Image (tube, helix red, strand yellow):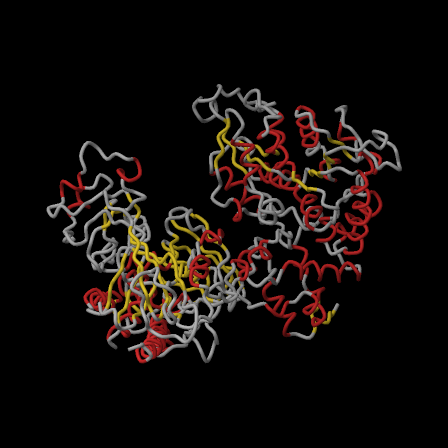
C-alpha cells in the first residue's frame, strides 16, 4: 500500500463496513478493514431474502464481499481486533506518518494497534478445500454461530461457504488440541491438508497502523429471548427467533431452505412482533425498526414454501415506513396472512403443538392459537462489548446504549471525536438501505478528512 | 355508581398504555369471565365516566399481577382494579363475604373473624418462643430474637394449614435458630386487604404491625405465606429488616448444613421408598411436582429455593409441569378470592392446574402458600384425583424427612 497517502480504518466487516471501505478505496485512499470474525459479511450474510424487493441477501452481498477481498486499496484484516487507538494529540490535522511507532505524535494521525488472532492456518497456503474440516474429530459437534446453532460444524471451519477470505480457521474454544492439549495420536486435520497449511505453532501478532480517519461499523446483537420467559424460548423447539428462521429459510442454510421443525413441515405458524422491543423492562424502550418488515417477509416466505400454511402475525402496530414497504405489507396480507392485533402473553405446550395465548384486542377477547412454529421478532440491542469499544475509541453512547452521533439530525454520522464516524446499527437499529446510506455518508465524511490531510501534507 | 375517570387515569398514570393487550392476554381469569383490564384501561382514557357497579367482574381478579409483571409500559393494570375496588369499598357496595372478611380483620385481626386470643392455638403443645416488644415485657421478657417468625392468619387458624407452622417451628428448633413469634399479638399483614381495595384499613395495619415488628429488634422476618412476605417486603418499611419467605430460610439452613434430612419423607399411607437409587414409581422414589405461587414466583422471582429444598430431599424426584416458574398458573386464591367466588363458579383454574400436575405422573403436588394448599387440595378432591395426587406444603414434606 502507498504509505505516502493518508489511509482510513474501518472497524467491522458487515454491510456497513464493506460499503464504507469500498467507497473510500474507490476514491483512491488506502483502507484497513478490520473484522473480528474469520470472514466479512456480518449479519447480512445470515439473511435469506431482503425486504421489500425479495432480493436474495447473499446474492447482492457476496459480490461486494469479493470486491473488498481483492480491491487493491483495501487491506482486509479478518480475524483481527483493534486493541488500542491513540488519537491525534495536537495541532491542526496534517498527514505525516512517522517511520516507527515511537516516532512521536504528529497531528492528524490515529495510531492503531491491531491484534491478529492466530488462525492456526497459514492463509497463504490454505486453498479452502475443506478436507481438514471433513477429517476433524470434532466434526458435527461444534455449534455454528453463523447458522444460529441449527447445525454443528467441525473445530476447523469457514463460517459459511461464500466466506471472504475462503480460508479455514481453528476454533480455539472447540479444538481438542488447543483446549485439552491432545487430539488423538496424530492431527487428523494436518494429515488431511494437502497444502500443509495447518500450523499449531502460530502465535497472535500485533500490527501498528497509522490512519487519518476511522469508521466504526461494529453492528448489533439481538436480545436473548429468555429475557421474556413467557414465550418459552429455550423450552420448546417450536419457538425460535427471527434470525434462526432466516437460517432455516435460506437456500444456502442448513436445511437448504426447507422449513422443517421437529422433523416435519409446520402448518400453523405464528409470528410474534416486538419481543423485547418497546419495553423499558428489558432495557429496550425503542422500536427496533426492522421487525415489522422482516416479519412480513418471513410470512411471505412461509406462504411461498408452504402454500397451505395457516399464518398468523401478532402485532401491536405495523410500521411500514420505507420506500415500497407499505406496498409489501399489502402484498403479504393479500397472500392470506392473518394479522391479529395484540401482543401475545404466553406460550405453552398442548400435545404436539404449542399454544400462543393472546388477547385479540380488536375482538376484545382472549384467544389461543395453536402452532407448530412460533417465530419471535427479537429486539436489536447494542453489541455485548459496546462499552469496551466505546472506551477503546473514546466514543459517547446515547441512553439506548448505542454509539452517539454528534447531532441526531444534522451530523448523523459524526462522533464527538474529529475523524471518527459511525455507520450502521452500532449507532442504532436500521435496515439495509439506511445502513448503506449511512455507510456512504461516513465514507464521504472520512474522505473529506483524508483529502484535507493529503493537501496539507508537508512537502 | 358513575365514576369520573380522569382523576383515576391521572393518579395511576394510565396514559402510557399502548393497548397491546398483553395484560388481558395473560390474565388467567379473563379466559373464564368477562374481566378485560385492557379494555377497562381504554375506557378510563376515553370515556368521561365509568359505572363501577356494572362491573361485578372486578371481584374476579386474583391480584396474581401477571399483567403488572408483563406490561411493557409500566402501566400496572391490576392497580386499576384495586383502585376501582376501593371506590366500591368506600360506597359500601361490595360482596357480603368480602365485607365480612374485612370486618374480621378490623375486629379480630384475621379475615375469618376468629377470636384474637386463639391466634396462637395452632402450636398445639409444640414449644414456641413468643417475643414481645421491650415495653410490654411479656414473652421472653422483652429479650427479642434474631429471626421473627410471622405465622399469618390462615396458618394460625385453619386446621388444614396449621401443620405448616408446626413443621416450620420443628425445623427452626432442629436448626438451632434463634427465633420467636408474636403470639396473640400478631395481626393480619394486610396484603389481601390492600388488594380488596380497603386502603384505609391497610394503612392502619401497616402502621400498627410495622411498629410492633420493628420494636422487636430482630434482624430478619420470615413468613409462612408468600402473601405476607410480599407486603412486608414491598409495602412496609421495616428499618432494613431482611424479609424472607420460609423457603428461602429453609434452603439457607440446608445449605449451611444446619438442617439435615435423615431419611426420605415417610408419606402417610405410602410404602416407604427404598433408600436412594430405588426405582421410580409407587414403590420407588417419590415423584413431586411444584406449583409456583404467584406472590412468591411471578411477583418476587423466588423460583429456585423451593425447588432446591425438594430436589435435595432423599428419595425424591422433582418433575416440572409444563407451565412453571414465570408461566405458572394462578390457583385463584389471592386478591380476596378466598372470600368471594367471582362471576364464574363452574370453571376453576385450580381444576386445570391439578390436572396439569397429575399429567406429570407426580404423586405429590407441592406448594409453598397456604392459599394454594387449600384451593388445590379442594380441586384434587372435586376432580376425583385424590387417589393418585396429594397436595402438600413443602414444609409438610420436609417435616416427614427430618
Q: Is residue B168 above or below residue B370?
A: above
- Above or below residue A277? Residue A419 is below
- The quarter of the image holding the C terminus of chain A is bottom left
Quarter of the image with the N terminus of chain A in it: bottom left
Q: Residue furthest left?
A: A194
Q: How many marks?
A: 0
Please state the horizontal and vertical placement of residue A142, each as a whole percent of the image: 29, 44
Q: Is residue A308 visible?
A: no
Q: Name the one closer to the observer, B176 or A352.
A: B176
Closer to the camera in the image, B400 or A202: A202
* Closer-to-camera residue (B226/B322): B226
**Is residue A263 visible to the viewer in this orientation of the structure?**
yes
Q: Is residue A273 above or below residue B153?
A: below
Name the spot of residue A232 as percent of width and height, x first. 45, 50
The residue at 23%/53% (across/down) is: A158
Q: Position of residue B250 (x, y in %)?
A: 62, 32
- Judged left or right of residue B227, residue B316 is left
In the picture provided, is B127 more to the left or to the right than A337?
right
Location of residue B350 in the rendering, given as x and y in whole percent from the top left corner = 58, 44
- The answer to whether A424 appears left or right of B50 in the picture is left
Res A208 → quadrant:
bottom left
Indicate whether A410 appears above or below A231: below
Place residue B372 in its image quadrant: top right
Amino acid at each position: 500500500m502507498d504509505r505516502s497517502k493518508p489511509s482510513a480504518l474501518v472497524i467491522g466487516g458487515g454491510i456497513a463496513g464493506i460499503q464504507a471501505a469500498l467507497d473510500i478505496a474507490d476514491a483512491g485512499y488506502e483502507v484497513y478493514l478490520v473484522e473480528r470474525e474469520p470472514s466479512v459479511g456480518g449479519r447480512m450474510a445470515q439473511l435469506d431474502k431482503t425486504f421489500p424487493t425479495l432480493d436474495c441477501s447473499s446474492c447482492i452481498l457476496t459480490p461486494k464481499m469479493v470486491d473488498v477481498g481483492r480491491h487493491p486499496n483495501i487491506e482486509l484484516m479478518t480475524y483481527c481486533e483493534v486493541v488500542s487507538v491513540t488519537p491525534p494529540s495536537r495541532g491542526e490535522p496534517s498527514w505525516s506518518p512517522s517511520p516507527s511507532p515511537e516516532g512521536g505524535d504528529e497531528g492528524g494521525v490515529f495510531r492503531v494497534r491491531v491484534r491478529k488472532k492466530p488462525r492456526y492456518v497459514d492463509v497463504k497456503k490454505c486453498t479452502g478445500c475443506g478436507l481438514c474440516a471433513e477429517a476433524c474429530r470434532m466434526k458435527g459437534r461444534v455449534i455454528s454461530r453463523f447458522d444460529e446453532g441449527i447445525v454443528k460444524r467441525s473445530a476447523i471451519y469457514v463460517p459459511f461457504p461464500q466466506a471472504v477470505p475462503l480460508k479455514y480457521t481453528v476454533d480455539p474454544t472447540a479444538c481438542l488440541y488447543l483446549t485439552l492439549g491432545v487430539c488423538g495420536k496424530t492431527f487428523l486435520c494436518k494429515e488431511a491438508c494437502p497444502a500443509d497449511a495447518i500450523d499449531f505453532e502460530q502465535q497472535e501478532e500485533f500490527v501498528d497502523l497509522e490512519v487519518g480517519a476511522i469508521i466504526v461499523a461494529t453492528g448489533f446483537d439481538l436480545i436473548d429471548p429468555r429475557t421474556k420467559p413467557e414465550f418459552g424460548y429455550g423450552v420448546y423447539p417450536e419457538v425460535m427467533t427471527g434470525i434462526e428462521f432466516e437460517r432455516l429459510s435460506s437456500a444456502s442454510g442448513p436445511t437448504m431452505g426447507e422449513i422443517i421443525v421437529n422433523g416435519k413441515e409446520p402448518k400453523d405458524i405464528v409470528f410474534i412482533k416486538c419481543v423485547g422491543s418497546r419495553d423499558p423492562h428489558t432495557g429496550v424502550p425503542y422500536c427496533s425498526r426492522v421487525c415489522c418488515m422482516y416479519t412480513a417477509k418471513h410470512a411471505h416466505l412461509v406462504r411461498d414454501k408452504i402454500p397451505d400454511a395457516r399464518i398468523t402475525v401478532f402485532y401491536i402496530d405495523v410500521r411500514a415506513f420505507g420506500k415500497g414497504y407499505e406496498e409489501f405489507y399489502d402484498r403479504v396480507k393479500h397472500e392470506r396472512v392473518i394479522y391479529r392485533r395484540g401482543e401475545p402473553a404466553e406460550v405453552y405446550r398442548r400435545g404436539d403443538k404449542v399454544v400462543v395465548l393472546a388477547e385479540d384486542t380488536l375482538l376484545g377477547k382472549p384467544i389461543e392459537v395453536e402452532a407448530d412454529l412460533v417465530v419471535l421478532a427479537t429486539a436489536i440491542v447494542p453489541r455485548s462489548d459496546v462499552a469496551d469499544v466505546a472506551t477503546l475509541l473514546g466514543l459517547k453512547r446515547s441512553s439506548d446504549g448505542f454509539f452517539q452521533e454528534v447531532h441526531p439530525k444534522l451530523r448523523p454520522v459524526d462522533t464527538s471525536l474529529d475523524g471518527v464516524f459511525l455507520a450502521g446499527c452500532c449507532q442504532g437499529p436500521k435496515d439495509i438501505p439506511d445502513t448503506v446510506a449511512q455507510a456512504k455518508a461516513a465514507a464521504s465524511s472520512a474522505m473529506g478528512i483524508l483529502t484535507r490531510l493529503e493537501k496539507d501534507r508537508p512537502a | 355508581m358513575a365514576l369520573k375517570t380522569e382523576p383515576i387515569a391521572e393518579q395511576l398514570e394510565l396514559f402510557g398504555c399502548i393497548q397491546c393487550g398483553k395484560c388481558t392476554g395473560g390474565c388467567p381469569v379473563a379466559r373464564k369471565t368477562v374481566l378485560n383490564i385492557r379494555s377497562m384501561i381504554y375506557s378510563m382514557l376515553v370515556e368521561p365516566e365509568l359505572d363501577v357497579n356494572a362491573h361485578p367482574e372486578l371481584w374476579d381478579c386474583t391480584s396474581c399481577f401477571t399483567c403488572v409483571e408483563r406490561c411493557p409500559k409500566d402501566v400496572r393494570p391490576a392497580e386499576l382494579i384495586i383502585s376501582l375496588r376501593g371506590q366500591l369499598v368506600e360506597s359500601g357496595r361490595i360482596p357480603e363475604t368480602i365485607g365480612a372478611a374485612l370486618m374480621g380483620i378490623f375486629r379480630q385481626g384475621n379475615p375469618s373473624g376468629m377470636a384474637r386470643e386463639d391466634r396462637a392455638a395452632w402450636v398445639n403443645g409444640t414449644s414456641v418462643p413468643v417475643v414481645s416488644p421491650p415495653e410490654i415485657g411479656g414473652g421472653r421478657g422483652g429479650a427479642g430474637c434474631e429471626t421473627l417468625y410471622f405465622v399469618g392468619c390462615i396458618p394460625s387458624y385453619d386446621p388444614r394449614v396449621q401443620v405448616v407452622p408446626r413443621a416450620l417451628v420443628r425445623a427452626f428448633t432442629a436448626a438451632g435458630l434463634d427465633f420467636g413469634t408474636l403470639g396473640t399479638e400478631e395481626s393480619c399483614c394486610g396484603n389481601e386487604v390492600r388488594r380488596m381495595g380497603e386502603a384505609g384499613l391497610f394503612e392502619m395495619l401497616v402502621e400498627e404491625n410495622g411498629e410492633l415488628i420493628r420494636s422487636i429488634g430482630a434482624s430478619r422476618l420470615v413468613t409462612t405465606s408468600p402473601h405476607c412476605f410480599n407486603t412486608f417486603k414491598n409495602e412496609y418499611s421495616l428499618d432494613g429488616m431482611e424479609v424472607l419467605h420460609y423457603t428461602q430460610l429453609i434452603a439457607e439452613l440446608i445449605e449451611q448444613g444446619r438442617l439435615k434430612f435423615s431419611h426420605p419423607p415417610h408419606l402417610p399411607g405410602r410404602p416407604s421408598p427404598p433408600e436412594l437409587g430405588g426405582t421410580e414409581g409407587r414403590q420407588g422414589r417419590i415423584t413431586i411436582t411444584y406449583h409456583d405461587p404467584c406472590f412468591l414466583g411471578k411477583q418476587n422471582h423466588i423460583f429456585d429455593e423451593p425447588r432446591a429444598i425438594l430436589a435435595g430431599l432423599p428419595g425424591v424426584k422433582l418433575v416440572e409441569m409444563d407451565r412453571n416458574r414465570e408461566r405458572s398458573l394462578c390457583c385463584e386464591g389471592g386478591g380476596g378470592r378466598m372470600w368471594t367466588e367471582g362471576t364464574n363458579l363452574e370453571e376453576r383454574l385450580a381444576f386445570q392446574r391439578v390436572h396439569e400436575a397429575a399429567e406429570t405422573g407426580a404423586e405429590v403436588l407441592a406448594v409453598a402458600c397456604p392459599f394454594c394448599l387449600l384451593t388445590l387440595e379442594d380441586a384434587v378432591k372435586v376432580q376425583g384425583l385424590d387417589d393418585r395426587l396429594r397436595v402438600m406444603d413443602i414444609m409438610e414434606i420436609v417435616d416427614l424427612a427430618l
